[in-house]
Image: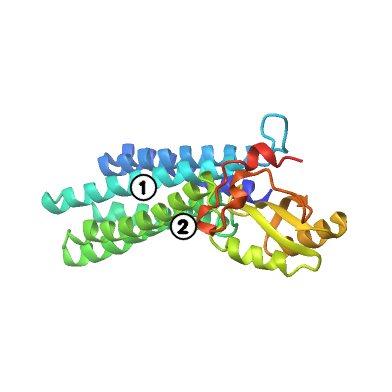
């Protein structure tokens, strides 16, 4: 799959650059470069984990994972976002420390490594730019962080070399870290919404209900549940009241739901004279909808 390949390329580029940094740091005796090499090695590790989880998410459903392994991709995005979150906080703390106690900087060394860093991480960001999975979005954000980070180092080093104003480096670093931090928090929220089985943000039960009622032959609909496996593959369950041909009704419903981005739907047909056995069906308010029963009652 293209997503797998892109994440693998990002992993290999990140790992190669961390080795390059480590060698450069040992040759120049720069503790700062060695520290960044360790940071990039940690980045590569999280991206490697994301790659393995993305591969695993492609497995087909089985007796253990009846809905498939798609959530493993979300887990990869969650891990990468947590690493980003932690890394951004550490970078902000280090930058504040540099403001309080400025350190001597080797501007020429910074410029050299920054140029290589921008090129390598730009390539990784380019390969992971496309794709809708939360995992690839998190990896791409990771690469974007590194591109911006090294761009800041490059610009800051050139400006500092001319002006000798060392505070530019930590101030720009804080700006980039805050930018990445805000995006990492947003990715974490998206992953959390998926794991908590929140309805996809672009779907509303009231709208789906109205669409179902507009279908010829449908008398009423209730007990609607919407959720997503990975932010892309959306599912639904519902009870349909009809006295028409159930096969034809199901076909029309599935066609309508597919247009709304719902690829899998479990539909229970009830006649107008039938009492629904689900307790929550009697509740009219949309705010009372819960997902507590769909896994146990709708696998048919």
Question: Which comes before the other along the chain, label 2 or label 1?
Answer: 1
Image coordinates for residue 202, horizontal then vertical, percent: 56, 63
- Residue at x 46% of width, y 44% of height: 80
Q: Residue furthest top?
A: 64
Image coordinates for residue 135, horizontal then vertical, percent: 54, 48
With 109 as the anchor, is 119 left or right in this view?
right
Q: Is residue 28 visible?
A: yes
What residue is disc 1 on? 85
- Residue at x 85% of width, y 60% of height: 244
Q: Is residue 203 visible?
A: no
Q: Nearer the viewer, mark 2 or mark 1?
A: 1
Quadrant of residue 218 within the rendered picture: bottom right
Q: Secondary structure at mark 2?
A: helix
What residue is disc 2 on? 119
Q: Residues within 10 Å of mark 2 (few under 14, many from 20)?
A: some
Q: 243 or 49: nearer the eye?
A: 243
Quadrant of residue 295 within the rendered picture: top right
Q: Does 188 sit above or below residue 176? A: above
Distance between mark 2 and mark 1 Cα atoms: 24 Å
Q: Secondary structure at mark 1?
A: helix
Q: Residue furthest front?
A: 273
Image coordinates for residue 227, horizontal then vertical, percent: 60, 51
**Number of numbered discs present?**
2
Q: Does 255 sit above or below residue 291? A: below
């Amino acid at each position: 799959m293209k997503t797998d390949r892109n994440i693998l390329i990002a992993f290999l580029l990140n790992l190669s650059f961390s080795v390059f940094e480590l060698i450069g740091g040992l040759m120049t005796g720069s503790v700062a470069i060695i520290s960044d090499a360790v940071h990039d090695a940690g980045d590569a590790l999280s991206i490697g984990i994301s790659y393995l989880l993305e591969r695993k998410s492609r497995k087909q459903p089985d007796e253990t994972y009846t809905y498939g392994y798609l959530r493993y991709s979300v887990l990869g995005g969650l891990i990468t976002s947590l690493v980003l979150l932690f890394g951004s906080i550490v970078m902000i703390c280090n930058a504040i420390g540099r403001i309080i106690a400025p350190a001597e900087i080797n501007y020429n060394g910074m410029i050299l490594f920054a140029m290589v860093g921008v090129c390598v991480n730009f390539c990784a960001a380019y390969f992971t730019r496309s794709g809708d999975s939360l995992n690839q979005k998190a990896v791409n954000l990771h690469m974007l962080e590194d591109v911006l980070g090294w761009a800041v180092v490059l610009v800051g080093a050139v400006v500092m070399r001319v002006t000798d104003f060392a505070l530019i480096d930590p101030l720009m670093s804080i700006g980039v870290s805050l930018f990445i931090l805000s995006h990492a928090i947003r990715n974490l929220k998206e992953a959390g919404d998926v794991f908590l089985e929140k309805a996809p943000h672009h779907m509303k039960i009231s709208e789906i209900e109205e669409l179902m009622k507009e279908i010829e032959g449908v008398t009423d609909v209730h007990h609607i549940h919407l959720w997503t496996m990975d932010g892309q593959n959306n599912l639904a369950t519902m009870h349909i009241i009809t006295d028409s041909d159930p096969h034809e009704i199901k076909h029309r419903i599935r066609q309508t739901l597919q247009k709304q981005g719902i690829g899998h739907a479990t539909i229970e047909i009830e006649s107008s004279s039938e009492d629904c056995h689900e307790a929550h069906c009697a509740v009219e308010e949309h705010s009372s909808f819960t997902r507590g029963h769909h896994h146990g009652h709708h696998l048919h």
